[in-house]
Image (cartoon, rainbow, N blue to C red):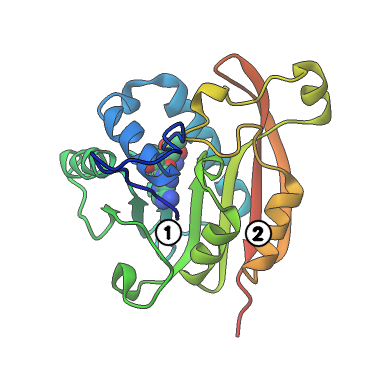
């Protein structure tokens, strides 16, 4: 990831060059700053509940046995909705403040960290990470549009699945009709483009390519319901893929 630092007293002709933070750094800053208020925002609470319900509809979660990773867990709104249906949940996020709120909430509810905990880490998909835990379900809600490379993230997440485990991704897209009526305006306002590489939402083809590239099989994609984001109309979708059994 190219990240150039300009030093004081360093004279160059290309001073008009604008320095952009990478997406991970911008996301950390943004989500750290809003960590203490997210859980009080009924829009985000309701969205996470809808995402969780749709995940519960497509996978037979079992509270006795299902081990879940909630990737890009933020303060844990999705985790909270999935928790009654899982044996344990590990939340992962790059925003330390969000992870702190997640873990504070867990401890206030009197839950054991073995059942539900979050860790702040930028996962690579390598041996030794997350104590070498492997998951029945990796869930990721409302976050794919924040990732610079969905191919890399999907490959990384597939690493953490058990054979036969499933990746469940919910995020935003637009139908052809929604695209037509929106004209040239993006689904996610361009003012968020420093946080969101995919301001027009994800596409089914893009998701399918990422899941295929990660070696996941039985790809399924479905539109769930209409959603209004900062005034723009989009559609919530769910993508599902299975890690082949060996
Ligand atoms: C919209 S929030 C997620 C909401 C949450 N999944 C829910 O359903 O309540 C997006 C999250 O993605 C996280 N994020 C962005 N880029 C990331 C990355 N590369 N790795 C892990 N988390 C990331 C942000 O810190 C933020 O907490």
Q: Residue at x 57, y 24 (%)?
A: 190
Q: Is residue 7 left or right of residue 233?
A: left
Residue 98 position (above or below residue 186) = below
Q: Residue at x 41, y 65 (%)?
A: 124
Query: Which dot, 1 or 2, sits closer to the camera?
Result: 2
Q: Residue at x 65, y 50 (%)?
A: 239
Q: Taking the image as four quarters, which one is ligand 1 found in? A: top left
Q: Which mark is residue 68?
A: 1
Q: Which residue is mark 2?
A: 210
Q: Position of residue 63 (x, y in %)?
A: 41, 57
Q: Is residue 221 left or right of residue 163?
A: right
Whether residue 72 can be seen here? no
Label 1 crowd (10 A; few <14 / some 14-19 / many >=20): many
Q: Residue at x 46, y 69 (%)?
A: 160
Tell me the SS state at disc 2: helix
- Say which quadrant the N terminus sits in: bottom left
**150 or 16: nearer the eye?**
16
Q: Residue furthest bottom?
A: 246
- Please tell me in which quadrant of the rendered image residue 165 appears: bottom right
Tell me the SS state at disc 1: strand
Q: Position of residue 80 (x, y in %)?
A: 36, 41
Q: Position of residue 43 (x, y in %)?
A: 46, 21
Q: Is residue 168 left or right of residue 226?
A: left
Can you tell me whether the CB of the residue at mark 1 lies under 8 Å from the nearest atom of ligand 1?
no
Q: How far is the residue under mark 1 from the one under mark 2?
A: 21 Å
Label 2 crowd (10 A; few <14 / some 14-19 / many >=20): some
Q: Position of residue 49 (x, y in %)?
A: 48, 34
């Amino acid at each position: 990831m190219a990240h150039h630092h300009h030093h004081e007293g360093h004279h160059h002709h290309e001073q008009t060059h604008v320095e952009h933070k990478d997406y991970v750094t911008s996301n950390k800053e943004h989500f750290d700053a809003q960590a203490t208020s997210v859980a009080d925002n009924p829009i985000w609470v309701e969205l996470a509940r809808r995402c969780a319900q749709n995940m519960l509809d497509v996978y037979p979660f079992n509270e006795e046995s299902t081990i879940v990773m909630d990737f890009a867990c933020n303060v844990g709104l999705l985790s909270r909705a999935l928790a009654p249906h899982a044996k344990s949940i590990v939340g992962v996020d790059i925003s330390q403040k969000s992870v702190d709120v997640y873990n504070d909430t867990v401890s206030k509810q009197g839950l054991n960290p073995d059942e539900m905990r979050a860790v702040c880490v930028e996962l690579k998909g390598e041996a030794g990470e997350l104590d070498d835990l492997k998951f029945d379900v990796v869930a990721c809600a409302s976050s794919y549009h924040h990732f610079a490379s969905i191919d890399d993230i999907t490959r990384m997440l597939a690493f953490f699945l058990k054979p036969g485990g499933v990746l469940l991704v919910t995020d935003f897209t637009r139908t052809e009709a929604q695209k037509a009526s929106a004209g040239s305006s993006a689904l996610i306002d361009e003012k968020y483009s420093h946080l969101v590489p995919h301001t027009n939402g994800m596409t089914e083809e893009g998701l399918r390519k990422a899941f295929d590239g990660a070696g996941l099989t039985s790809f399924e994609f479905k539109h769930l319901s209409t959603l209004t984001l900062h005034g723009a109309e989009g559609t919530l979708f769910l993508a599902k893929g299975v890690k082949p059994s060996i």
